[in-house]
Amino acid sequence: MYELSGVTKRYQRGKKTIDALAGVDLTIEGGGRLVIQGPTGGGKSTLLQMLGALDRPTEGSVVLDGVDLGKLSEAKLTTVRAQNIGFVFQSFNLIPTLTAQENVETALVPLGLRASERRGRAADALDSVGLAERFGHLPSEMSGGQQQRVAIARALVKNPKVLLADEPTGNLDEGMRDEIMEVLEMLWKEHGLTFIMVTHDTALARRAPRLATIRKGRVTITENAAA
């Protein structure tokens, strides 16, 4: 699925050069699950941006299903994101003036589907995350956990190959955190997704079969046979 070779991302801050990623080599098999952890400023978000085709490496290659993302045009990268990659964020990123169903449908607009097909797929996606009775509710009428379920439905409605989650439980209490993780783990298994998540939560990291610890732009992989 993913093959990262010598991935370096270099930024210029005044006269100082900073390597957010420093020669990362990483393989992520299709259908696999990986958690990324590390200190603030260690490179977690930069790595996730590379995997999500949101940024390009300064050096090295990020290959997804045999395609070097760094060599694609912006238009083709947009297509890759629209068709193959679903994103879930800590802050939900829902549009406050749209209902749950309309928020989910936004992920399908770039695919050029008919309105009736968008509505049907959005309804099915919301049902799959346990929100069958919340289709017409605005974000302000839902709890944080329900809003995150809408965000998960939006990420999965386009049937992506990859699900990227950036601190998806960071704004939730412990009980709701566990509920959301159960939803994500269920959907990962049911859909055969490649599931990659950034988290500061060590308890969540222990649930994953692979952990990528990133410090100063360098990645160390730990296998968790008990997960």
Image (spheres, rainbow, N blue to C red):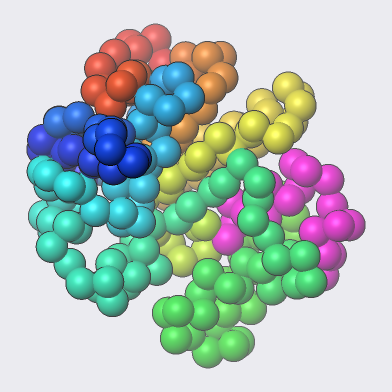
For residue 154, above or below residue 110: above
x and y percent of residue 169 in the render? Answer: 63, 33
Range covered by the magenta-colored residues: 136-154
x and y percent of residue 205 in the render? Answer: 47, 19
Q: Please report the residue visible at 17 percent of the width from the left and 67 percent of the height from the top.
A: 72
Q: Is residue 140 magenta?
A: yes
Q: Residue furthest right?
A: 141
- Front in this rendered view, residue 166 or 55: 55
x and y percent of residue 119 in the render? Answer: 63, 78
Residue 99, by quadrant, is bottom right
Apparent side of residue 150 relative to residue 27 in the rendered image (left or right): right
Apparent side of residue 174 relative to residue 157 in the rendered image (left or right): right
x and y percent of residue 12 in the render? Answer: 28, 43
- Front in this rendered view, residue 124 or 5: 5
Q: Residue furthest front?
A: 15
For residue 144, above or below residue 95: above
Q: Please report the residue visible at 57 percent of the width from the left and 79 percent of the height from the top.
A: 118
